[in-house]
Image (spheres, grey):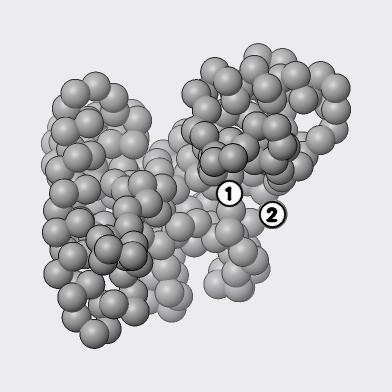
Amino acid sequence: MGSVTPSDQEVVDLVQRIRQEKPNLGQAKILEILKGEPHHWRISESRLRKLVRSVNQLNGSSAKEESTQEGQLCIPDDALAAQDRYIKGGKRAFRIYGRGKYNYGVSLNIHEAIPFRVARERLTKLSRPESEVDKRCIAMIWPLQCIWDYYVAAAAKAGVAKEDVGRQLEAEYGVPWTYLPTPGPERTGPEAEAMKAKFKEQSLFLKRKISKTEEGRKLIPVDKHGNVIWDEERNGQFAVIVVKIDKGDGYQEFGGA
């Protein structure tokens, strides 16, 4: 039997039933149940994490497993310099801060990494805004919105509160996150779907070109007909890879979030 993709409501309803029967069951075990007999659901760990959060709110409880919302949020005084050091000294695109045992390193695919790097370079050339007018002006330019989009996407995958990654953004660039438009990962409607489709079209075009090279054939997965395989969760717009990193040395990694 093939796997099927359930709706959000189907997942929430089943998780509620599971939690009623086994209130202490962790998220990893719940994911096993959803993917196994008799459901055979196709659902990612990050999607389940977000939906479990909704169930926790409905039940008036908080998840016990790998909670990142406990403890203090420790953002360095010179947050932008600290981010620069992490990027130069590590292998990830950026870092976000968690309240739990770990911070998080974030990687982007090649179609995302280049514009993200350009956005950071452009912002670092600007003076830190002091007036409210300057802050609101910078909030409306592409570089900061680009960075905010990927911060929000990474925070959602890591289970970090949007407000917390917003505090980090303000510490680094001096602009309150509440001044920015709705981030890309949270947008819905025809315009958002059109942007998503355009990103896929451009990405597939580039992947097809790369897959025709000797080195590209080792990197780009294709089906038996030679068509590029597209995985929305890995290749789609705002797709991110998030790993736990040690808060002590700031670089040691402990697997995916």
Give how far across and how far down residue 250 sits, in percent: 56, 69
**Residue 73 vertical position relative to residue 195 in the rendered view, above or below:** below
Amino acid type at image mark 2: Lys
Q: Residue at x 33, y 74 (%)?
A: 219
**Residue 161 vertical position relative to residue 117 in the rendered view, above or below:** above
Give how far across and how far down residue 203 sits, in percent: 20, 56
Among the 4 quarters of the image, the one containing residue 24: top right
For the residue pair 228 and 127, the one nearer the viewer reads as 228
Q: Secondary structure at mark 1?
A: loop
Q: State yes or no: discs 1 and 2 in contact (Cβ < 8 Å).
A: yes
- Can you tell which mark lies on residue 244? none
Q: Which residue is mark 2?
A: 101
Q: Secondary structure at mark 2?
A: loop
Give how far across and how far down residue 129 sits, in percent: 21, 45
Q: Residue at x 49, y 61 (%)?
A: 105
For the residue pair 139 and 223, the one nearer the viewer reads as 223
Between the residue at mark 1 and the residue at mark 2, the CA separation in whole angstroms equals: 8 Å
Q: Residue at x 52, y 28 (%)?
A: 6
Relative side of 233 to 199, left or right: right
- Tally of numbered tags: 2
Mark 2 burial class by Cα count in 10 Å: few <14, some 14-19, many 20+: some
Q: Which residue is mark 1?
A: 98
Among the 4 quarters of the image, the one containing residue 153: top left
Amino acid type at image mark 1: Gly
Q: Residue at x 51, y 23 (%)?
A: 8
